Image (tube, rainbow, N blue to C red):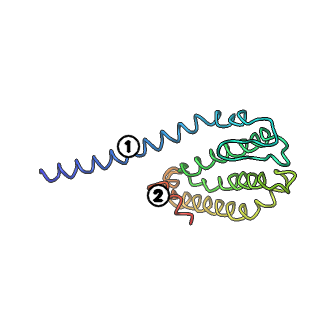
Amino acid sequence: MDNKQQKSKKDLVKFHQRDRKGLLVGSFIATFIALTPYFYYLYEGVPDTQTWNTFLFTYDAGAWEYANYAMWILTGKLIPLLLLFIWFFTCRHWWYHTLLVPIAMYLYQILNFFNDSVNYIDEFQLLHLVPIMAIVVPSIYLLRARMFDKINTANKSMEELEDEFKLKPTTLWGKIKQYF
């Protein structure tokens, strides 16, 4: 009997350690999401000049003409991208791979932001997204078809099927590793 109590105490300690870690990560993510409006307006601290000098670096706006305008464009692309990454890595639904399409779009726009030879950063991006969409859209369709096939042949609810198709890595690093 004493051995069972010790084992259950060890399991309880392990649960509290995992629960504490999850609470810490969840609190960090929630705080970051709550602060995103403030992060978006960080561009207002950038001067309306061609060159922005800080103690860390010097930024030349180049074709953007004003560093403030360039940072406004960058924060308008970066903040939604970060929120999409949070959604992607915390989503537990079977369709979360569809988030790769807007993530790829924002990544493409940010890469073009730093390319001085591009005059319009949001032009022709759909053509570059076609390869990603060619992989994501059919795979989501096939997954959905498998789910509806199982619904028609089995007596399972939609929630039970979603749980069956969920990938459940235990850590954030495990979720990242499943893609590479």
Q: Quadrant of the C terminus?
A: bottom right
- Most foreground residue, 102 or 35: 35
Mark 1 crowd level (few <14, some 14–19, many ≥20, 10 Å Cα): few
Query: Which residue lies under the disc numbered 2?
Result: 169
Seen as rendered, the residue at the extreme front is: 55
Secondary structure at numbered mark 2: loop
Query: Which residue lies under the disc numbered 1?
Result: 20
- Residue type at the position of mark 1: Arg
Single out the mark in the foreground, 1 or 2: 1
* Residue 155, percent from left and from top: 49, 56
- Most foreground residue, 120 or 2: 120
Secondary structure at numbered mark 1: helix
* Residue 161, percent from left and from top: 51, 55
* Residue 6, percent from left and from top: 18, 50
- Most foreground residue, 70 or 104: 70
Mark 2 crowd level (few <14, some 14–19, many ≥20, 10 Å Cα): few
Q: Is residue 28 above or below residue 145?
A: above
Residue 94 sits in which quadrant? Answer: bottom right
Residue contact between numbered discs 1 and 2, judged by CB atoms under 8 Å:
no
Residue 77 sits in which quadrant? Answer: top right
Answer yes or no: is residue 131 visible: yes
Task: Residue at 72% x, 60% y: name it.
Answer: 133
Answer yes or no: is residue 155 visible: no
